[in-house]
Amino acid sequence: MASNGKENLEITVVGIADGEAQALAEEQSRSKSKLQRFISIFWSKSDADAETRKFLRRIDLFMFSYILLSLWIKFLDSANISNAYVSGMKEDLGLYGNQLSLFSTFYYIGMAIGNIPFLFLIDRVRPSIFMPTFEILWGIIAMSSAAVRNENDLYGLRFLLGIFEGCGFPLFATVAASWYTPFELGKRMALMEATNNIAQMFSGYFQAAVYSGLNGVHGIAGWRWLFIIDGCVSVAIASLGYYALPDLPHNTRARYLNEYQRAFAIERMARVGRKPPVELTLKRYFGLFKTWEVYFFVPLAIISSGTTPTSFILWLKSLGIYTVEEVNVIPTGAYAVAVVSNFVVGCISDKTLIRLPFVAGSIACTLFETIVLAVWNVPFGLKYFAFFGSYIGAFKWTGFQVYAQDYLQYSHEMRALITSLYNAFGCIFSAFLPTLIFPSGQAPHYKYGYKVAAGINAALIIWVGVLGWQCNRMALRDGRVRNEYGLAVQRDSIEKLGESGEWKDETVVSVKTVEEKV
């Protein structure tokens, strides 16, 4: 009996242990599920299968990480000129006129020119070859900026820097849109754009550290050291691109993707409806300019030009109450606001597949800032808030880029052209508009700048509505239907996709007429 009692006790103890282990496993499973759902809010769909998640992790680790690093150093090259200007360059080179605005003008002219060869290069030379090569060249030019003797030297170097950096964002945007679906692209494009703000934020800390730690070392001024270090980092990052950039799904040779994953990438884009590229001849290139898309999408390039005043750092310096280090560091808080708001709105946009309303709302944030600064004689705190608050609307540029990739998925060449023209005209506007309405000699209180910018922002909100109306109208005219991603495609492309077997049920039941609003 005693033996049976002991055995029963052991069985009971074992049973309790097994039950606790099972309960613990279920709790861990629930916790993991909650964690996955939480992560999916910000990064991937919660119902994505294991193969998709594995594929995305690999693409994110190599391609997307390299894109972010490249854009970060590209924008850092651009942002450092302002930090160098307020950290001794102005006094060393005797820049007491409108030179700072002209530095930007020459840079953006070079950027506009650099966008031109992009469309022809992407079809003839692998992005994994020419993009890292261009990066090495702009790194060398950035380092050369440390040796300038006067403003004329810097004008030429800024122009060359713009040429080699010009194709950077259009290429990366086109490549990214060829690998990610609409549920994945918005947040990633938001991070790509956020590298601009991160670069400006980092540049402030970077210049403050360089100025305090290297100023005068080997007889070299701190602002010159900034260009030297910046160029060295550019070359180092460029070397990663030869391996990390996978080209496009149909011609990738990426060694970190196996044959199944390459086929899987092509399959994903076919399911979205994104067409692969075709050879772009001069005849086909000029034929694209006869389409309505160019004349409705490109005007929004003004978003990336002079509609958001960047005079915060100049206003801080004009107050005369902050040190050089503080003038460089304080604006980083505004850049942090832009990074967070851009990413959060990008996540929401991916979840809802709504783009243009968020673009209009973001422009409205900038409109508020420009109105406050146009009045100017407002409480100190409100002016501070206006400078910070404008960065809440950072998604306007990202949202438009993603919407263009979504709507124009029926033509790889049209997507690339709109991205290229958008950046080119944005550079042209950025080259001349800020110089005209925000002359550095009037900083930080411009006579007409904020008023003009407020009017442009108001007009842009109206144009966003016009663009959405035109896109829906043309989709209706062409008899398109919406696929499972909410993209307007030809019905026969969905029917053809359904005939392949695996996707038939999912695509057919998700077809919606284009009359339904996005």
Image (tube, rainbow, N blue to C red):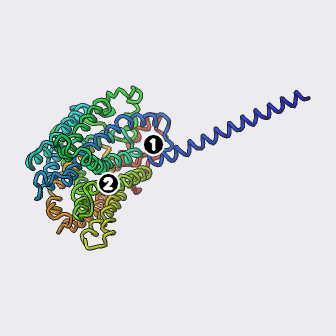
In the figure, 60 relative to 472: above or below? above
On the image, the x and y values in percent for residue 320 come to 23, 64
> Residue at (26%, 66%) from the top-left corner?
370
- The percent coordinates of residue 254 (x first, y second) are 33, 28
Front in this rendered view, residue 393 or 20: 20
**501 is higher (above) or lower (below) than 80:** above
Residue 479's x, y, as percent? 35, 50
Q: Amino acid at mark 2?
A: Thr
Q: Nearer the viewer, residue 310 or 488?
A: 310
Residue at 36 percent of width and 52 percent of height? 339
In which quadrant of the rendered image does the N terminus lie? top right
- Circle 2 is placed at which residue position? 332
Q: In the rendered view, does 212 fall on the left or right side of 190?
A: left
| Quarter of the figure with residue 136 | top left
In this view, the residue in front, 14 or 259, is 14
Element at label 1: helix
Q: Where residue 507 is drawn, which disc sits there? A: 1
Q: Earlier in the sequence, mark 2 or mark 1?
A: 2
